[in-house]
Structure formats: C-alpha cells, structure tokens
Amino acid sequence: MIITIDGPAGAGKSTAARALARRLGFRFLDTGAMYRAVALAALRRGYDWDAPDDLARLARKLNIESADERILLDGEDVGEAIRATEVTAVTRYAAGNPQVRAHLVELQRRAAGKDDIVVEGRDQGTVAFPDAQCKIFLTADAEERARRRLQDLHSQGEPVAFEEVLAAQQRRDREDAARAVGPLRQAPDAVEVRTDGMTFDQVVDRLEKIVREKIYR
C-alpha cells in the first residue's frame, strides 16, 4: 500500500509521515529531502543557478538514498545539512527544474517498489503516485506553519525572525503553486487534514484513522 502525504512548506509532513510509518510498520520516504540534497550538492560545488541543464546533469550523477529515515548523499548522512536556511533558499531551483524533477520522481518510484510505504512531498498524490491507495493533503494556516518552522530553526541555532520566516514561506508557497512541472495542488481524491490547533499526537492519530479506514473499507 502506498500512502501519499502532500502539503505546503511547514505543514509538518515529514515528522507526521515518519510517525505514521512507524505506527503502521511501513517504510518512509521523504521526497522533499531528495530535492534538498540536490540543492545542497550544487551549493557545495558553487553551481550557477541560472544553468538548469548543469543542475540536471549533477542530479543524475548523485547517489541519493533514503535509508532508515536518513537521507544519504553519496553515502553521507545530510539529514541536518539539508535543513539549513541557505539550502532551503535554493531548493526551488532543484524542485522547479523539469529534468531534475523527472529524474527524482523515477527514483522515488523505484524506492517505493511494491512495499508498504508512506511518501511525503508536494506532488506525490498527483504526479509520482497518482494511483496511490490513500492520499492525504496536510496543511495549516500560513502563520501557524511559519511558527513551526521558526521553532525548528531556533532549535538548530539559527537566529531568524518570525517575519523573515513567514515571508520566505509565502514566497515558497507561490513558487510551489506556480511551477510548470509538479506544482503543489491537492489531488481530487485526497483527504484534507488541517492541523491548526492540533497537537502532534492528534495529527498522527487523525492520519492513522484515515489510513485504517482505507485499509478496512
């Protein structure tokens, strides 16, 4: 069974999807981390963001793996590095690159195989796995999402202001929705879950209930 969890930046998709996968005994695939890994690799190499073909060639050369809830870039665990503000700021170049996106979607499908898996991202239920048996669209108000992102950044020692985080997030929302390939949108058959005012455990409880209703329907 494939469970897709899509939604905007800061909706808590990754942490909720991981917890859901553990509860169900499913594998977990963080597809957003794959785009971040490409951006990190390009950033480290000083790539020109205005040269999309070069970025696509780099993506095809990289060995990106999702293993045991870790993201490996050429064998290096980059789980923390890809969450840095400077990586977030340039991930759009990877996410909005049609060649990079096509390559990573293929990797995502291979990684899923025929296993029971929870996948999260922006276009999992619409592009990567349109035939998934259970689709969820996880979201929250912009201010709520920005507060969550701010907490994450502060816990990582990055002293940023709420207004800065909110502005960056709103920019990402616009870019994600306007992408020519794999834009952020809710699949017609996805169940929307708004997490405003919900605790983390309440969110995971709600997701588990949706999935189990699909399984036993």
Image (cartoon, rainbow, N blue to C red):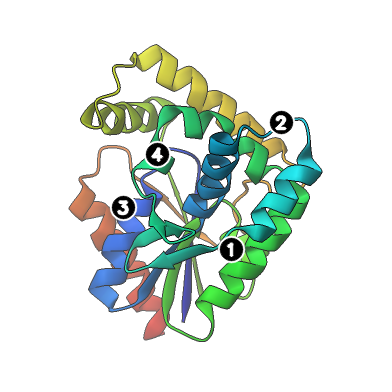
At 48% across and 27% down in the image, what residue appears? 86
Q: Secondary structure at mark 1?
A: helix
Q: Which residue is mark 1?
A: 125
Mark nearest the camera among 1 and 3 is 3
Query: What residue type is disc 2 on?
Result: Asp
- Sequence-first tag of 3 and 4: 3
Q: Are marks 1 and 3 in contact (CB under 8 Å)?
A: no
Q: Which mark is residue 48?
A: 2
Disc 1/disc 2 C-alpha distance (Å): 31 Å
Q: Residues within 10 Å of mark 3 (few under 14, many from 20)?
A: some
Which of these two is toward me, 71 or 138? 71
Q: Which mark is residue 83?
A: 4
Counting from the top left corner in percent of width and height, residue 71 is at: 41, 58
Q: Residues within 10 Å of mark 1 (few under 14, many from 20)?
A: many
94 in relation to 147, above or below: below
Disc 1/disc 4 C-alpha distance (Å): 24 Å
Which of these two is toward me, 44 or 113? 44
Work out whether residue 170 can be spotted.
yes
Counting from the top left corner in percent of width and height, residue 217 is at: 41, 84
Disc 2/disc 4 C-alpha distance (Å): 21 Å
In the rendered view, does 160 fall on the left or right side of 180? Answer: left
Query: What residue type is disc 4 on?
Result: Arg
Q: Are marks 3 and 4 in contact (CB under 8 Å)?
A: no
Mark nearest the camera among 1 and 2 is 2
Disc 3/disc 4 C-alpha distance (Å): 13 Å
Query: What residue type is disc 1 on?
Result: Gly
Q: Which residue is mark 3?
A: 15
**The image quarter in which residue 196 lies:** top left
**The image quarter in which residue 18 lies:** bottom left
